[in-house]
Image (tube, grey):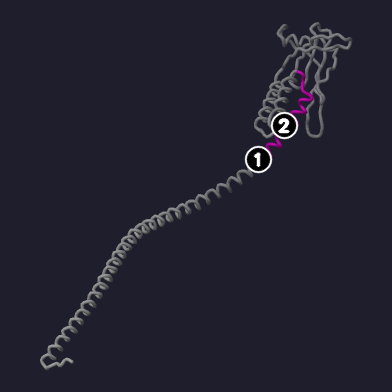
Amino acid sequence: MITLYPQNFFRASLGVSFAAIFILLSSISFAHADEYQRLEAATKRWVDLEKRIAEERNAWKAQKGILEQRVLALEAGLDELSKSLENLDEASNIRLGEIQNYDATLTELEETREFYVGKLEEMETLFAQFRAKAPDFLESELETAFEKLEAANPAALGERAQILIAAFTRVEEFNRTVTIDYVPRRLDDGREVMVSVLYWGLARAYAVDPQGTIAWELEPGESGWSWNERTDSIDSILELVRVYEQTRPPSLQIVPAKVTQRAEGGNNG
């Protein structure tokens, strides 16, 4: 059994107190150390968070600049597109007006073409009728014109008109002049002689053999020229031919003729 005296008791109590205080301080030190570590970790997280925020902010600023440039470019593109659309609308209206004018012009051209087609058909009909009763002297030229018409494109109105105009021009030249031709002629007795045919345009013609034994008066008709023998005018027709050929001096000759004048109310012969 231990007996504690007052002095020893005080010392023992003081030792216990110091031990308790030491334990308490140690506990406080450990507590402060934990708080510091937590504070340091929190501070580090905050610093990292601020760094990330700054990085995100800088990246956003860069992206924002790019987006703003793109927006400006898109706005400029939209302005140009709007202007282009306005120009296209104006051009479309202009083209629409031109198309309407072209349609009107095309309608006029079609009407004009129908008119000339009708006139050309009339000329072709007249050409066919004349070709059927044309003198032998023009036969080859008219046949050539006919072949050209057959070979020409039916839609080529200008080409066909030129062919017909050239043919009728040649006919008109023939009609305005006196023309001589030399053709073979078979007689009723079977003999074939070369005769001289003197055309007075398209009105009349006279033919005679070189010996002056037979003569004809030629008259145009619906199916060609008819040869009418004129035994009563052989000498005058032969002399007429020789004067034209300049083998005789000019002289007055009386040959058979018939002049028909067309007038209102009938024909006078």
Tell which of 10 and 82 is nearer to you.
10
Secondary structure at numbered mark 2: helix
Horizontal side of residue 104 vs 17, given as left or right: right
Residue 86 locus on image (x, y percent): 47, 54
Tell whether 31 sits left or right of 166: left
Residue type at tag 1: Thr
Q: CA distance from mark 1 to mark 2?
A: 16 Å
Q: Residue at x 81, y 7 (%)?
A: 212
Tell me the residue at 15%/85% (across/down): 15
Q: Position of residue 253 (x, y in %)?
A: 77, 12
Circle 1: element type? helix
Q: Which residues make up the magenta segment?
A: 114-136
- Residue 250 numbered tag: none
Report x, y in % for residue 202: 75, 22
Q: On screen, 247 above or below 226? A: above
| Residue 94 percent location from the top left of the image | 52, 49
Disc assigned to residue 112? 1
Which mark sits nearer the N-terminus, 1 or 2? 1
Q: In the rendering, which numbered label is found on residue 123? A: 2
Tell whether label 2 touches label 1 (CB within 8 Å): no
Q: Is residue 133 magenta?
A: yes
Say which amino acid is labelled 2.
Met
Taking 230 as reference, is 17 above or below it?
A: below
2 relative to 92, above or below:
below
- Local packing at callout 2 (Cα closer than 10 Å; few below 14, some 14-19, many 20+) is some
Q: Residue lying furthest right in this view? A: 189
Residue 10: quarter of image: bottom left
- Assess disc 1: are there few (<14), some (14-19) or many (≥20) residues with their C-alpha within 10 Å of its C-alpha: few
